[in-house]
Amino acid sequence: MLGLDMLDVAIGVIFVYLVLSLVATAAVETFERFLKYRASDLERGVRELLRNDKLVEELYNHPLINGLYVGSYQDAKKIKELPSYMPARSFALALMDLVFPSQEDSAGGTTGATHSAAEGASTISHPNLEVLRTKLAEAQDPTMAKTPMPAALQNVEVEVARALMLLIDAAQHDAAKARENIEGWFNTGMDRVSGWFKRRTQTFLMVLGVVVAVALNADTIAMIRKLSVNKAARETIVSQAEAYAKSNPTPKQPASVEASLNNLGNYALPIGWQNYGCSVCWPHRMPFTLWPTSKQVDICWVGGWLMKLLGWLMTAGAISLGAPFWFDTLNKIIVVRSTIKPHEKSPEEKSKS
């Protein structure tokens, strides 16, 4: 039964990691909603794509984008109420309408996104395309005569003009394909934004992991020792882990964080400062105390604190990996346990011959 016991210990520790990770993730989400980091990241990503604050403002004030938030761009920016998500299609259509506006009068005129919604050889034929090319040529040779710049292109930077020309030329002037190319350009920029968010979340989780580990005294080493010798606690937490994995197809925040943390204490795990009297000073097996009992600092006392610090760091590092990682790991180990458990309980009979 040694192999099954080790799996049960692993399942118990991973389940604790999962619960603590869910608590930390919920805290990070609360911070994100309060500080509005996602909206500021999105705006920063759009600004790096378009390279011009005026064009960014026009894009956010475009009806396709302005419907995602309340008020004007400047007002929403002041109170941090900009949208945290922008559809790639809306971005592409709004940008095409800003850079290639209608050249006709308002009565029955077309927009800059004409023919871009359906597949087909609907070519983009617009005077601003040639102006974009002229602008690029002038950027390479400043001695060339400056041509009057249409109002729609006055806020388009040379780098953005080059990108738009490449995207349109790659589409062979097919309006629908050009829109798709602009959407891809936007999505590529948003991949960077996602990277900013993930790195910041990872940092937050690591910091919160340390706080949670110390505040709850969630010592990985102590938990492993407890589950290794306490069969009842091991079986209880394994059954709870299996029930949670079966009833939740995705990592789900428990209805009550406080109840979840209390349940961990009910598993007889050494979590919480009320359990600090457990034996952690291995291999001496001396009781761990917050303060040395003699005037001279006891070696065992120092060793106990070092082991506890290591256990906290292990817990904090595990929490920083996030709840999805531990949820997937928990499901995989439960599957492994279910495949070997029958063999552990009923060894295969030897051949009578």
Image (spheres, rainbow, N blue to C red):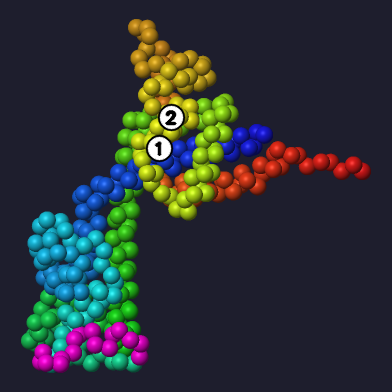
Spatial separation of the CA atoms under disc 1 and disc 2 = 9 Å
- In this figure, which residue is indicated by the disc labeled 2? 265
Q: x%, y% of residue 240?
A: 51, 39
Hey, which quadrant is residue 49 in on the image?
Answer: bottom left
Hey, which quadrant is residue 262 in on the image?
Answer: top left
Q: x%, y% of residue 345?
A: 70, 38
Q: x%, y% of residue 165?
A: 25, 82
Q: Amino acid at mark 1?
A: Ser
Task: Identify the magenta region.
Answer: 105-120
Of the residues under marks 1 and 2, which one precedes in the sequence? 1
Hey, which quadrant is residue 147 in on the image?
Answer: bottom left
The vertical placement of 92 against 6, above or below, is: below
- In this figure, which residue is indicated by the disc labeled 1? 260
Residue 316 visible? The answer is no
Front one among 47 and 145: 47
Q: Amino acid at mark 2?
A: Gly
Other-residue count near label 1 (Cα within 10 Å), few / some / many at <14 / 14–19 / ≥20: some
